[in-house]
Every structure is written in C-alpha cells, then in structure tokens.
Amino acid sequence: MTRVWRLLLGLLRELADENAYRRHLAWHGRTHSREEWRRFSDERLRAKYAQGKCC
Amino acid sequence: MKLLRVLLWTAVAAAAAVGLGGIALYRGEHINSMWLVVAAAASYTVGYRFYAKFIAARVMTLNDLRATPAERLRNGHDFEPTNKWIVFGHHFAAIAGPGPLVGPVLAAQFGYLPGTLWIVIGAVFGGAVQDFVILFASMRRDGKSLGRMARDEIGKVGGFIALITVLLIMTILLAVVGLVVVNALKGSPWGTFTIAATMPVALLMGLYLRYWRPGKVLEISAIGFVLVMASIFFGQRVAESSMAPWFTLAPMALAVAIILYGLLASALPVWMLLAPRDYLSTFVKLGVVLMLGVGILFVRPELQLPAFTRFVDGSGPIFAGKIFPFCFITIACGAVSGFHSLISSGTTPKMISRESHARPVGYGSMLLESFVAIMAMIAACVLQPGVYFAVNSPAGIVGATPTAAVATISNWGFPVSAADMASLAREVGETTLFSRTGGAPSLALGMAHIFASSGGGRALIGFWYHFAIMFEALFILTIIDAGTRVGRFMLQDLLGHAWEPLGRTSWMPGVWATSAMIVGAWGYFLIQGVRDPLGGINSLWPLFGISNQLLAAVALCVATTILLKMHGLKFVWIACVPLVWLVTVTFSAGWQKIFSPVPAIGFLAQADRLAAGAQTAATATLIFNARLDAAVCAVLMALVAIVLVDSLRIWVGILSGASEAPVREAPFVPSRLQVEEL
C-alpha cells in the first residue's frame, strides 16, 4: 500500500513538474528560491509547449 | 506452475473470444456493458502478453543491458531515467485528449458493435503497435522526433511533409474541438459560467506559483480544483438568477469568445494561463477517467442502443457515410492516432530508464487509452436511443422545433417525446438538449447517469452533467491555447526565413501577427462549423479523422522502413498491415468526402447542390466553404501520397540492394544504472 501511495505521489509530482524542479536543483547544485523556480519554470514550459497537446 | 500459467492464459483468451463473440452475435433486447468491458480487457491482456511481448523480444530485441538516452544523455532536464509507472502515467496523460471520448460517442450512431470492435482490434494491432514501434525507434535514436526520423529514414520530403501535415491537423483539430465546446455551451448559462470561472482560477494559480508560493504546483492545483468545483456549484445559482442572460450565449458569440481567448492565450506568457490550467486539467482528466471506470464497474449499466442501427446504410444524421470507411476515421484516438507518434517521439523516450519499459509505456498506455474509448462508447450507449439522436442530430436534419425533431427521430424507430426531453433538460439544469451536436453533451449525459447511479441519485444529475462538461471543456481549451502557441512557433520559424524579426519570439508585433494568422486559420473553420446548417461536425470531424489517420500512415511508413532495414521482409507486416488498412480507409474516406455524389457526404456535391438553389451571400459562403474543405482534404491526401511513394522508392531500393539500408541507431553503450535508480 505504501508503495502504491509513493508511486501515485511520484506520478502527481512528475505531472506537476515538482520532480523535474528537484532534479534541476540537484543537477545545478542550487537551492530553492523564487528566482530559481522562475528560471526553471520558464525553461521547462518553453520546451513543454513547443509541442501540441494530443487529441 | 507452467500448466497453471497455460490454463490461466487459456481462460483469459477464452474470455476475450467469448466476450467479442457475445457482443458480435447477441441480438436480444439489451446487452450489459460488462460484456464490452470483459471483451476489451481480456483482448488487451492477451494482446499485451503475447503480441507486444513477441514484438519486444523477437522484432525489437529490447535489451536492458543497453543504456537508454535517458541515461546516456542525462541532463537534469528532459533526459532523466524515470520510474516505469511514472513514465506510463506521464505518457498516458499526454496522449489522452478529447478524441477517445468524442469519437466513440459520434460513431455510436451505427450502434455499439462497429465502433467497439474497431476500438479493440484497431488498438491491439494498429494503434498500440504504432506507438510502441515509434517509441522504440526514437529511444534507439537519442529521442529524435517523428519528423527527424522521417527525414533520416525516408528522406527530406518525408520530414517536411510530416511538419506540414501536423500544421494542417492542428488547424482542423483546434476548429473541431472549439466547435465541440461551442455546441456544449450554447444557451447554457450554468456551463458557460463554470468555464468562464476557470479563467480567473487559472490566472490565480499562475500568480500563486509565480509570486506567492513558487514551485508548489500540487498545492495550488488542489486549491484550483476546489475553486472549479465551487464554480460548478455556483453556476447553478447563476443560471437561476438575474445574471443568467449574461452567460446565455448564442453559438456565434461563443465561437468569437473562443477565438479571442485563443489569440490572447497564445500571446500571453505561458506561466500566466496555459501552464496552470494544463496542470489542473491533467489531474482532473486522470481523476475523471478513474471515476468513470469505477462507476461503470459499480453500476454495470445496460446498453440501450442496439448493436446496429439503421444508419449503417450511410444515412446517419450525426455524420453521413457508411461504416466503411467512416466508422474507422470517426474513431481515431481510441484505436489508431497519428498524433500519438509525436508524443512517442517527444518527451517519453527521454524518460525511459530501461528498454523493456517501452512495452508497458508505448503499447500499454495505448491500450488504456483504448479502454477510455470503450468507456465513452458505454456512456453514449446507456442513453435511450431517442435521447441520443435528439441530442446529437443537427436541427438542419431533424427539424428546428422539439415537435418536428421528436417526430423525425421517432419515425426512424427511436421513440422519444418532447416532454421526455424537456424533463431531462430540466433535470440537468438546461433549457433544451435538442441538437447539441459534437458528442460532448451526450457523453456528459451518459457520464452523469453513471455517476448519479453510483451515488447521490438523480438529485445530483445536474451537478454531474456540468461536472462532465467542465471536464471536457477544461482540457479542450488547454488544447486550443497550447495548439495555437505551437502553430505560432512553427509559423514564426517558417516566416523568420523570409523576414528575420518575424522569427523572433521576443518581438511582440511578430508574436501577435503570427498568433492572429494561426487563430484566423482555425477560427475560420470554427465559424464555418457554426454556420453549417448540418451542424459542422458532419464536415469537420471526418476531416480531422482523415488528417489524424494520415499522420498515422506517415508514422507507420517510418516504422515499416525501420523494420525493413532491421530484418528485411521478415517482420515488416507488423507495421505494414496496419499501414495498408489505414491507407485504404483514409483514401476511401477522403475520396468520398470530395467526390461522393451524395451532398451530405461529398463536399463538391454539396457545393453543386447549393449552387443550384437560390443565391444569397450566405449561400456563396457555404459553397466556398464546401470547396475549401474539398481542397484541404485533397491536399492532405496528396501530401501523404507523396510520403507513400517516397517510402516505396526506399523500400524497393533496399529490397533490390540498390540502396544502402543503414540502421541509424545510436551505438550500444552498457547501462550502469543501479536498481534503486529505476
């Protein structure tokens, strides 16, 4: 049950880009801040919406 | 143990055979929806266990010792090894749109059987194979896109045509989904208020993430969900108050509002409106799909529509044309969808940590999407046939008044009364449910029926109806603003070659000008659909289906070429058989849509009939539109014919030994991923 919950939470965090943000912080060795989130978010969303949503 | 396994799989295969046989042969009064659920689930299980495993082991030779692009090119952004089930959910959320919901509802005009069989068989042997092979090919090629693979494997022409086809599909797609929203919200203050309220909610979410609690996406999505639910609740109060006229809009006013919204959303910063609503719509979408699945299992409703209706002869009121080829283009996303190949060669291949995960992600996600289509078919078929046709048939066919509409529909053999329709409309908080074409309202009625039967009873049916409308409109609007933005990028990229400033995404006049061009293109088709006396769906949905399936043909050409290079003729049938089927279906449908002498089917015949009647400015526009639709259809067919000829040239060259056939995979690098990283 714990495993299912962790997987579900993991999926929600992936869909919410929260996991990607954590990876971004870890990869660049930075800490969370408003500016860092904006930098990440702008880059992430630019790439994400360069592709159409599926029908 | 082996004997037990054999017995188990024999039982599953028998369940699939009995289920499919049962729904195909049963001709009694009503059939329970569980027959469809069992037939589909057992067929998917057998397809996944045997066919997908065969493709994975013998054709692709997936190798977990080989490092995937997610590992080799890991960059902390898009290339990242990710848990198998998370990638599965991510991929499913990306491929699931309104297509598998709306298509089956429209195709139910033939009865439940043709659409159901196509959804199950098409997905197992076509759609899931396409998604799986393209995902595999992209994974072995550093996550390359379909267009890039088409250019590398077939040639420059293939790559360019894939790009143009995508642009055309998006234009038609955005128009047709816009029309679905217009028809769902026309004259509905409750629905319009709810959808209008999602805009400030999305803006609030955007500001919250940007300024107040950066990074807390799940937190604000939960708040956004509560606010949207509250807007459904208050929508009923608004519809019953003196504010109702503000939110009671005619189709044309709604179309203009959607066009202006698309223009605004495409040019606004993405964090402000598009991204927050996309987060919300993704969570709502997954939640509703789960709820619908549980609801169907709990209620186990009986299907009221017959296996076949009289409209198999091609005289259908929702869209004209016979089962072959029109059923197979009406249901695209639930069976085979070319658009999926863009997702399978987009983000997903960059997240897969082990090659063997491509099977559950590529093949398995498509089976789940197909199951969503089965659920939509069930939701449509639980309605009384008379109600189903009264909601989905345009006024131009059944008549503009309730009396005329019920008389026409009852004469078809599907009894319905004006009093029944009025009572149902009252129950769901609408003034009328007649001629709400597009599939969304009838799907919402079916879903509301299932949800209300699961708990809450008829008292909550109005809430559930508007909840379903909100759910459909929410992600359709996300498709509209994301699609317009992508179209704008593509156009800026193209026009930037002619005049450099137009290519700059930071130059606002260029951004607004290109956004206006894209919005103008799909907006034109949307207005055309609103003005169409036959409801618009009759001409636009087939165009969308044809274009989507033609993109699938391009993807399967790439897949066939890759399989031919890998194994010669040995396994080429895996992609080639669905390719031949799709080419036959789409070219037949395209030909009929252009040249059929029946005006309800053929665009040119429709234009000729209009030309023969009294001439007004409105008639001239309708004639022009019919000819334009014929031209778009012809262009799409010509583009794909070029890819096919180009592919054939390559295949003949490979088989005769005249051309080199290099397999352009990235070189083998052993994986060093640890178990805990998977």
Image (tube, grey):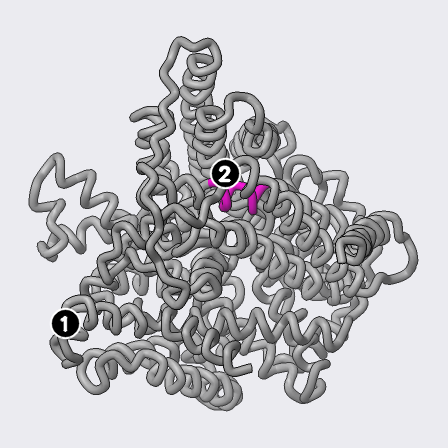
Place of residue B311 in the rendered image (x, y in percent of width and height, measured from the top left): 75, 45
Among the 4 quarters of the image, the one containing residue B390: bottom right
Residue underneath mark 2: B60
Kind of residue at disc 2: Met
Residue B502 drawn above or below residue B353:
above
Q: Quadrant of the N terminus of chain B?
A: bottom right
Disc 1, disc 2: CB below 8 Å?
A: no
Q: Is residue B255 above or below residue B532?
A: below
Of B275 and B393, nearer the camera is B275
Q: Which residues are magenta?
A: B126-133
Element type at mark 2 = loop
The answer to whether B41 is drawn above or below residue B550 in the figure is below
Determine the residue positioned at 45% across, 73% down: B283
Residue B134, percent from left and from top: 45, 41
Q: Position of residue B424 (x, y in %)?
A: 70, 76
Q: Chain of mark 2?
A: B
Crowd tier of the residue under label 2, counting other residues whose Cα lies within 10 Å: few below 14, some 14–19, many 20 or above:
some
For the stretch drawn in magenta, what is the main secondary structure?
A: helix
Identify the residue at horizontal 11%, vertical 57% (top origin). Answer: B508
**Residue B483 seen in the current view:** no
**Dot 1 corresponds to which residue?**
A29
Vertical relation: B641 (above or below) B120: above
Q: Amino acid at mark 1?
A: Gly
Q: Residues within 10 Å of mark 1 (few under 14, many from 20)?
A: few
Residue occupying the point 78% across, 71% down: B301
Which residue is found at the position 73% from the left and 65% from the top?
A: B387
Q: CA distance from mark 1 to mark 2?
A: 38 Å
Residue farthest to the right, as pictured: B28
